[in-house]
Amino acid sequence: MRLVPLVPKDLWRYAITDWHQLILPAILLFATVLMGFVVRNVLFRWLRRRQANSSSHVALILMEALRGPIIIWSLIFGIYFALENSAVPRHLEHFLSKSLFALWIISFTVMATKLAGGIVRYYVRRDGTEMAAASLTRSLAQIAVAAVGIAILLRHLGISITPLVTALGVGGLAVALALQDTLGNLFGGFYITIAGQVRLGDYIRLNATGEEGYVTDISWRSTTIRTLMNSMVIVPNSKLSQAIVTNFMLPEKSMGISIGVGVSYDADPDRVEQILMEIGEAATNEIDGMVPKGEVSVRLIPGFGDSALQFQLNVKISEFSRQYLVQHELRKRILKRFREENIDMPFPTRTVLLRSEKGTPLI
């Protein structure tokens, strides 16, 4: 495509010599832009009301995507109406029309990019619920939409994309060799996101190093983990994709925990079992973090200890991080109830037998 090099100068000359013919186009331009602001405010007010009365994120996504493009579109329509009601030379009108269409492609691409990011952000499904997507997923969706928009824009401007694709293919090998670690992290993050074995909001533990916490983000380079102490652990994606990971949110968030209890050998094991069952069943509806009406069991495991009968109270909690509060409350209730029932919880004891060189006991 060959643009007329004197277009800006011709446009300036036309604005000076025929300024009186620009009054009506200027009025139309101003009125159209003003109407765009009015439509934008009315539309956003309606979307805010819809968002307030609904749990859906559709209104929020539309507001984020249309906030800027609506003004650009009103400006494009204003200039178009102004051109239709003006007597600018034909080559100037052609230049401005082509520029307006290019601006419309850019603005529509921006809107589509924000829309794609919003959809991926708010509508990634996990166990039937909505949760925010990883920044890597949003970035990939936005890059794909932006690439399509740029290709359409280049085609409109008469620029062939074939040489660009060829150049990228030739230079891609050199870039891949120079950025091996970066690309390893990128593809590692892509694998983690697609596999779905580590997701945002999951509580995980790295078995090799012991770090654990909630996954807060998966970016193109690293995965961010927030520990229970509210610290951030940043793990490169290439390391995480190769690590042995325990995910405490899969296959479901709820999990079982066991609380060890030791009682005297003089205690009645049936009575101890009954008391522990009563404590566990009552706690399921009273302690925050336990699964309501969850399964409760008591087992004489590991059984015969050095100085006590060892029981296990097994209960179900809603998620991994709730176990600390649940154990705290259950242990207080067990101690209080055993004191009321006069059930002894003995201190660890050990009998030491001393013998002489001849093998006879000294004590």
Image: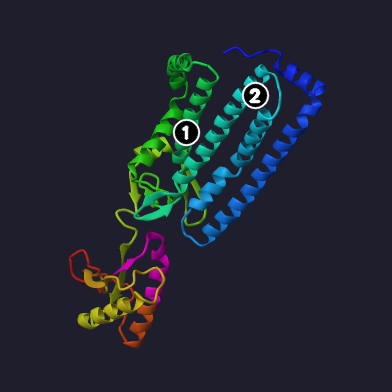
Spot occupied by residue 158 in the image (x, y as percentages of width and height): 53, 17
Spot occupied by residue 75 in the image (x, y as percentages of width and height): 65, 36
Spot occupied by residue 38 in the image (x, y as percentages of width and height): 66, 48
Residue 60 against residue 347 in the figure, above or below: above
Q: In this view, does 213 lie to the left or right of 252?
A: right
Residue 344 against residue 141 in the figure, above or below: below
Question: Is residue 362 shown to the viewer in this render?
Answer: no
316 magenta-colored: yes
Question: Quadrant location of the N terminus?
Answer: top right
Residue at the disc numbered 2: 96
User: In the structure shown, which secondary structural element does the residue marked by tag 2 occupy?
Assistant: helix
Span highlighted in magenta in the image: 314-332
User: In the structure shown, which secondary structural element does the residue marked by tag 1 occupy?
Assistant: helix
Q: Give the residue displayed 24% in from the left and 73% down from the top.
A: 298
Residue 145 — which label? 1
Q: Main secondary structure of the magenta part?
A: helix
In this picture the colour scheme is: rainbow
